[in-house]
Structure formats: structure tokens, C-alpha cells
Amino acid sequence: MYSKEQIYEQALKDERAVQTTMPNGEGVINNGVKIQKFPSKIEIINLSKGGDYYQECTEQEYEYFYTYGWREGSIRLCMSNTKRLLKKIEDKVREEVNTRKNNKHIQSIKSRRDNLLIKYAERNKQLNKITNGKEKCL
């Protein structure tokens, strides 16, 4: 089990992550996840959710980080976000096929689905490398 402070330290050591500086704190971004450290708190933001504002992770999403740490937790959260988007796309395809039947739009949605499946497969490979010990887990 990792603490937020340990997760933030792991994020700072992650070579693939981008470090940012804000007026009142610091942050690290990787795989659509941002961890921010302020003088009073540390929070993890899911950049794949929300509209005008990014949202802090839910308790279930925080569990990825508490259990697996920064690197593996961010990959698992990215995979979870991709699954959520794939479900939305499947619903759109189903709705389009049952209503308008616009082939151009259906192909556009399917193309997006294919891109998401490729992204999911890449993250799955990264996760397998980490869990099989081929890559040093921070």
C-alpha cells in the first residue's frame, strides 16, 4: 500500500512523465493522469474525465495508485478510461445502425474505436512488462 507522498515521489522519478510548475504547487503528468502537490495536500487528477474542468480521481481510481504505485496505477487508470470510451463508442455505433444508418458516420466511429483498441493494447503491453518484472517498477 502506497501513500500519496510515496506516489508523488515515484511520479517525480518517472522518466516518461512531464513535470509542471504551477503558481502554488508542482505537478507531474503521464498517461492522462496528473498528480499535483500543494503545500496543504496532494491530489491525483484524471485528465480523461470532465468537461470544462478536470476532475479529481474517485476513490476507486485512487485505489489503483494506493495498490500499484504511480507507474502501474496510471497505466491501469488509462486502461479503465479507454474501456469507458470503448463502451460509449459501442453504444454510438449501435444507435447509429438502428436509427440513421449513415455509413460515413458509422465508419468514422469504427475508426475511432480501432484507434482506442490500439491504445488499449499498447497500455496492456506496458502493464505486462511491468508486472513480469522486465521493467523496473518505481
Image (cartoon, helix red, strand yellow):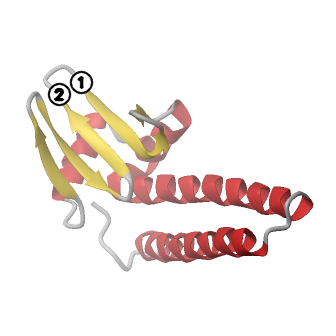
Q: Quadrant of the N terminus?
A: top left
Left or right: 94 in relation to 63: right
**Separation of residues labelled 1 and 2 (CA atoms):** 5 Å
Q: Residue placed at 51% from the left, 72% from the top?
A: 119
Q: Which residue is mark 1?
A: 41
Q: Pointers 1 and 2 in contact (CB under 8 A)? A: yes
- What label does residue 2 carry, if any? none
Find residue 110 and report its horizontal and vertical position in percent.
69, 73
Query: Left or right: 103 with respect to 113?
Result: right
Asked if one can make out residue 1 in the rendered structure from this viewpoint, the answer is no
Label 1: element kind: loop
Residue 15 left/right relative to 134:
left
Amino acid type of the residue tagged 1 in the rendering: Lys
Q: Is residue 93 above or below residue 84?
A: below
How many residues crowd around disc 1 within 10 Å: few (fewer than 14), some, or many (20 or more)?
Answer: few
Near-viewer residue (70 or 87):
87
- Give whichever of 95, 91 is nearer the camera: 95
Side of 84 where 137 appears, left or right: left
Where residue 111 appears, as percent x and y from the top left, is 63, 76
Placement of the C terminus among the 4 image quadrants: bottom left
The residue that label 2 is drawn on is 38
In the depicted structure, whether residue 4 falls above or below residue 87: above
Does residue 124 show up? yes
Q: Residues within 10 Å of mark 2 (few under 14, many from 20)?
A: few
**Vertical arrangement, residue 118 with respect to residue 127, above or below:** below
* Image coords of residue 90 (percent x, y): 75, 61
Q: Residue at x 29, y 71 (%)?
A: 136
User: Of 45 and 6, which appears nearest the observer?
Assistant: 45
